[in-house]
Amino acid sequence: MGLGASPGCGVTGAPADTAFTYSELDMLLRGTGRDGSIGVSAIDGLIAALVAGPSFVHPDEWVPLIFGGHRPNLDENSIEYRAVKTIFNRYNEVSSLLADRPGAYQPIFMVDDMGKIVAKDWGVGFMLGVGLRSAEWGKCILLTRHRALLTPILVYADSSIDLLPDMSASEKRRRQTSAHEQIAGAVAAVHAICNPHRAIEAHRNPPRSRRSRRAHR
């Protein structure tokens, strides 16, 4: 199984000279054998939730999740610095696309040995991002009429957390065969709904205030 993208889309963006390609980063993270590390498709799902969601999440909170719970070494000569650089290249790319060209946004999915799209890793990453601000997601999306927008993503969610109680397991499996085709549109739609909430939050809590509040936790 390797890294790919949804049909009709290459791995977009040209990483900076100090960054890895997305495929290189995927091999580095998933091939080291370190417990807790996740691959690029899951990271991409996480980034989509962070960018599209209703509330800002500081990188100090989510970047360690990618590195097995520890803060990466940001020495410019370190491998982890290059990995973080690659991750933020994608974060910035997704931010730019959803803000300016939402129709051009495409997720990065895994592709199995038969060439079939595998979206489960991406979905797990997205739900990880949702969980970081579950209350805000509830108010804006999950506990509102907009919840249905997330159906193409929720069908891939961990079976231990049933967010589609009215959908049978067989129906979820059936939808999983094509739901990935609807994910890009779902992310763009969620971003459009949540963006006003983020703007209100940013006005109420400018970056300096957020840093100060974290420092006193």
Image (tube, helix red, strand yellow):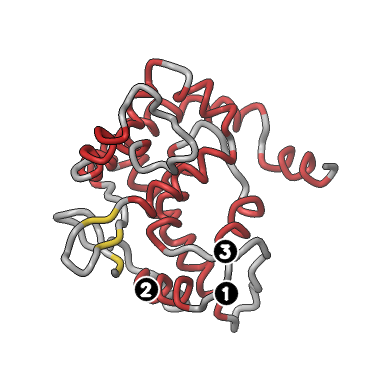
Corner quadrant of residue 72: bottom right
Tell me the quarter of the image containing the N terminus: bottom left
Name the spot of residue 193 as percent of width and height, x first.
40, 25
* Disc 3: CA contacts within 10 A as few (<14), some (14-19) or many (>=20): few
Label 2 vs label 3: CA separation? Answer: 21 Å
Above or below for 200 versus 38:
above
Amino acid bearing label 1? Glu
Q: Nearer the viewer, residue 195 or 66?
A: 66
Above or below for 158 versus 133:
below
Label 1 vs label 3: CA separation? Answer: 15 Å
Report the residue that reaches farthest toward the right. Answer: 216
Q: Which residue is mark 1?
A: 80
- Tag in front: 2 or 3: 3
Report the residue that reaches farthest toward the top. Answer: 145
Judged from the image, the secondary structure of the residue bearing numbered disc 2 is loop
Amino acid bearing label 2? Thr
Name the spot of residue 162 as percent of width and height, x first.
45, 32
Q: Which residue is mark 2?
A: 21
Q: Which residue is mark 3?
A: 36
Above or below for 100 versus 115:
above
Q: Earlier in the sequence, mark 2 or mark 1?
A: 2
Q: Position of 205 compared to 156: left or right?
A: right
Q: Nearer the viewer, residue 149 or 209?
A: 149
Tell me the quarter of the image containing the C terminus: top right
